[in-house]
Image: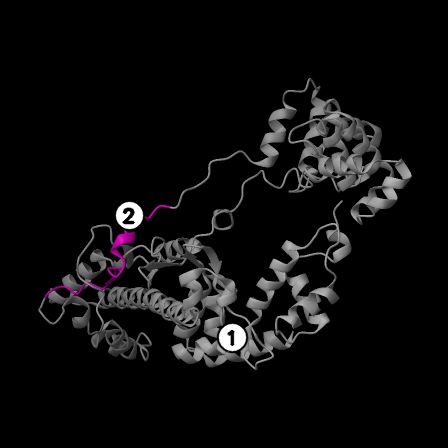
């Protein structure tokens, strides 16, 4: 067990069940919250969706009533005395003598009421597309089964990374077919003619070559590109273009045409096809920040948090029991069960509300700290900010802020960002000013983008340029930031 896991377990042991539940709910992104609520609805019949649009608010005194109810129940052990002492008055009436109606309705964000539905993509999966094309081949039953096995062996990127011998073994054990590798290879060659081009390749070189061979009628640059990948694949991936140019006696224009042909190819032909989890295909923002004439306005996306309430049927059962004169043991057992389910429902509703309060509080603090960025969208205006800063502003634990920052998104007029994007360490300038490392990374990115690609800037030159701008930074730090920006070293950025 790692040290971090051990610390997490010790932390969880100190938390109450209610706090643990809140921690878990905070980690659930908006896109998955609806599923979590659905699970709770299925497990607890006393909890239901409020589809009637009741106007009464979720009472502020709910927590006090819940605590009171929990205290009444915590010592129950099923004895006859427990049944005789069942008190359900707080469950069936409120201060005005009416039936209590506990619910959670997000009236703070009424403009979101018409956005309850998430668009769902209707699409054909990657393997379904290939099986459809497979059905167009004139294959006998045996060959079709072999081809099906090959298609099923392709990974999500469209590559066949399994050995033919392993596919042969699978066919022997699962289909009872004795198939040699030559027969499998012949069918692989046919599958490699399917769309999208590059499907069924064993490695990147084969994938790119399959695509180029489909374009042979496009001219000499395609023929040269095939020659380059066939003989000089390693050199090409390392951008040793001069060596390739000398070996094949190519002009500058020819090598540029070859490079352009290759970089336009798709290295993952199956990567853009297939059924993708909705939560991954769509970033559903948890917050919306709007610039209203220089004033920032924050709203919480509540479209995946249905309005919840206590079941009317369960409250009616308690009301009928309260009015009845004869109360046998079986009825009292049923009432205790109903009471526990109502307590659980009220507790869950409270957790949902606490989740929303925590999210809004955390995002409000981030928005205030990074106000200049939310107004301008300029990353160089971002201030240094760590988890501790937001924890102090909100009064929340650092671990709670971390859970919110790692799993939530905010939509702004400049784009949608994960909350952890706004957190960064500080770096000192020559004047002693503390600036965000995010600012330094932005300037570094701009320098690399503006460089002459025929003579890209080395890490040493980038360090010198940043120091000239007043940033005290070491070369190894520049290299680290460059890697974090997914920018390769200067040699690999070179273009002809």
* 100 in the magenta segment: yes
N-terminal of the pair, mark 1 or mark 2, is: 2
- In the image, 202 versus 238, the foreground residue is 238
- In the image, 459 versus 178, the foreground residue is 459
- In the image, 237 versus 333, the foreground residue is 237
Residue range highlighted in magenta? 98-117
Quarter holding the C terminus is top right
Instruction: Report which residue position mark 1 lands on.
Output: 386
Q: In x, y percent, where is residue 158?
A: 67, 38
Is residue 130 depicted above or below 217 in this figure?
Answer: below
Q: Is residue 495 left or right of residue 286?
A: right
**Residue extending furthest toward the right:** 247
Circle number at residue 114 = 2
- Main secondary structure type of the part rendered in magenta: loop
Q: Is residue 130 left or right of residue 346?
A: right
* 404 in the magenta segment: no
Quarter holding the N terminus is bottom right
Instruction: Tell me what residue is drawn at x 58 percent, y 70 percent.
Output: 437
Assess whether mark 2 and mark 1 are in contact (beta carbons under 8 angstroms).
Answer: no
């Amino acid at each position: 067990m790692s040290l971090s896991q051990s610390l997490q377990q010790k932390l969880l042991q100190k938390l109450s069940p209610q706090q643990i539940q809140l921690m878990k709910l905070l980690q659930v992104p908006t896109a998955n919250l609806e599923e979590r609520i659905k699970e709770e609805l299925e497990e607890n019949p006393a909890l239901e969706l409020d589809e009637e649009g009741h106007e009464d608010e979720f009472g502020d005194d709910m927590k006090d009533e819940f605590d009171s109810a929990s205290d009444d129940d915590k010592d129950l052990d099923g004895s006859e005395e427990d049944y005789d002492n069942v008190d359900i008055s707080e469950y069936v009436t409120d201060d005005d003598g009416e039936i209590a109606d506990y619910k959670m309705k997000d009236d703070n964000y009424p403009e979101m009421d018409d956005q309850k539905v998430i668009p769902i993509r209707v699409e054909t999966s990657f393997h379904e597309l290939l099986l459809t094309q497979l059905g167009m081949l004139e294959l006998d039953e045996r060959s079709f089964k072999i081809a099906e096995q090959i298609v099923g062996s392709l990974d999500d990127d469209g590559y066949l990374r399994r050995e033919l011998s392993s596919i042969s073994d699978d066919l022997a054990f699962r289909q009872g077919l004795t198939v040699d590798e030559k027969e499998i290879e012949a069918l692989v060659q046919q599958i490699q003619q399917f769309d999208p081009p590059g499907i069924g390749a064993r490695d990147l070189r084969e994938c790119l070559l399959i695509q180029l061979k489909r374009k042979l009628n496009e001219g000499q640059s395609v023929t040269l590109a095939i020659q380059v990948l066939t003989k000089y694949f390693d050199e090409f991936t390392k951008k040793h273009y001069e060596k390739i140019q000398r070996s094949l006696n190519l002009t500058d224009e020819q090598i540029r045409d070859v490079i352009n042909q290759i970089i336009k190819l798709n290295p993952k032909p199956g990567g853009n096809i297939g059924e993708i989890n909705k939560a991954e295909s769509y970033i559903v923002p948890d917050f919306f920040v709007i610039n209203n004439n220089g004033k920032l306005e924050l709203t919480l996306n509540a479209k995946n948090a249905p309005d919840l309430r206590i079941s009317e049927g369960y409250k009616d059962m308690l009301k009928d029991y309260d009015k009845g004169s004869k109360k046998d043991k079986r009825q009292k057992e049923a009432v205790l069960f109903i009471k526990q389910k109502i307590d659980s429902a009220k507790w869950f509703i409270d957790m949902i509300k606490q989740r929303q309060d925590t999210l809004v509080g955390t995002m409000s603090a981030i928005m205030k700290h990074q106000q200049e960025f939310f107004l301008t969208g300029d990353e160089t205006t971002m201030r240094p900010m760590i988890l501790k800063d937001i924890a102090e502003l909100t009064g929340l634990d650092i671990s709670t802020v971390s859970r919110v920052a790692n799993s939530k998104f905010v939509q702004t007029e400049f784009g949608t960002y994960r909350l952890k994007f706004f957190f960064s360490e500080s770096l000192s300038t020559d004047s002693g000013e503390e600036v965000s490392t995010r600012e330094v990374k932005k300037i570094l990115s701009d320098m690399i983008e503006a460089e002459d690609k025929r003579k890209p800037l080395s890490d040493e030159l980038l360090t010198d340029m940043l120091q000239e701008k007043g940033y005290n930074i070491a070369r190894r730090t520049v290299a680290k930031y460059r890697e974090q920006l997914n920018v390769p070293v200067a040699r690999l950025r070179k273009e002809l």
